Amino acid sequence: MSGVLLELDRLAMGFGDLAVIEEITMHLARGEFVSILGPSGSGKSTLFKLLLGEHRPASGTIALAGGGDRRSAFAYMPQRDALMAWRRIIDNITLGLELAGMSRRTARRKVVPMLGRFGLEGFERSYPDQLSGGMRQRAALLRTIVQDRPILLLDEPFGALDALTRMQMQGFLEGLWTQNRWSSLLITHDVREAVLLSDRIYVLSARPGRVIGEFDVALDRPRIGSAGLAAAASAIEAQILDLLLNTNPDAKDIVS
């Protein structure tokens, strides 16, 4: 498929007799923002662990364009900010670069010009517990982006934030993505978040997770805070919720 950067073909995996995902087929194009949406336990995080090489599929394949090396393909942002309490913010942000072999001095030179854009200028020497939740997440996002990997993996990065901060972070991410068009995969159980951020959405069933729907989100950007797009976005949300609730009647956690 032209422009495809990542392709998953009929992936299946389980633990012993417990099937977690089955026959998962999906793709990510260059410069595309794709969400994987499903109820808790549907295998969303398992998919990321497969991509990162933490698990091996029982069957199926994962392919990168040009046969690229998966070990250097992904920059991963976890559900929690995972900032180290004993490291200053600047040193938390440079951690991934340092682990990849870059000297601390060179890593800092790369990061410092980006701090203002992320609202962190002046807080370089602060510790994580001195920052708000939104600032911590911006630091974690910068730590992920600065690695310059081909694909961003975003694992429910705003799920632990309060509603207002979560919306602010979604708007912040949308603005950054619109400027940079990073190839991005987001996993979430928040239907509204998926619609506001994504070009396409894959919907998973309850465990064992399988793709039960794919939605194109052909809405103008910016979307977050746009009253003019509210009706169109709500219509897509309603379609997705209808599919999820009819397929997974007990999946109450998907209703945001």
Image: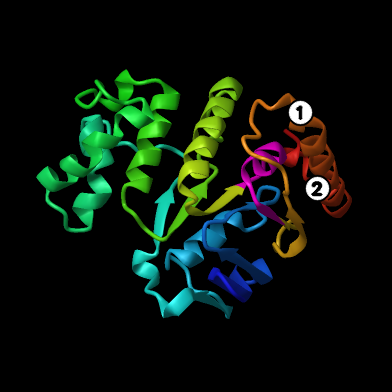
Identify the mark at residue 228; answer none if there is no mark.
Answer: 1
Which badge, 2 or 1, is on the more N-terminal residue? 1
Looking at the picture, tell me which residue is in the foreground, 217 or 138. Answer: 217
Determine the image quadrant of residue 85: top left
Look at the image and tell me in which quarter the C terminus lies. top right
Q: Nearer the viewer, mark 2 or mark 1?
A: 1
Identify the mark at residue 32; answer none if there is no mark.
Answer: none
Looking at the picture, tell me which residue is in the foreground, 74 or 196. Answer: 196
As displayed, is residue 122 above or below residue 222?
above
Q: Residue at x 35, y 34 (%)?
A: 139
Q: Residue at x 42, y 33 (%)?
A: 137
Counting every numbered tag in the picture gives: 2
Could you tell me residue 244's position as x and y percent? Answer: 81, 50
Q: Give the amino acid type for the residue marked by disc 2 in the picture.
A: Ile
Residue range (magenta): 188-202
Q: CA distance from mark 2 to mark 1?
A: 20 Å
Look at the image and tell me in which quarter the N terminus lies. bottom right
Could you tell me residue 149's position as x and y percent? Answer: 37, 58
Looking at the picture, tell me which residue is in the foreground, 61 or 59. Answer: 61
Secondary structure found at label 1: helix
Looking at the picture, tell me which residue is in the foreground, 111 or 160. Answer: 111
Question: Within 10 Å of the Cα at label 1, are there few (<14), some (14-19), or many (20+) other Cα atoms?
Answer: few
> Along the horizontal axis of the image, is 86 left or right of 17?
left
Q: Is residue 79 visible?
A: no
Q: Residue at x 51, y 36 (%)?
A: 175
Determine the image quadrant of residue 136: top left
Is residue 239 one of those drawn in magenta? Answer: no
**Residue occupied by mark 2:** 240
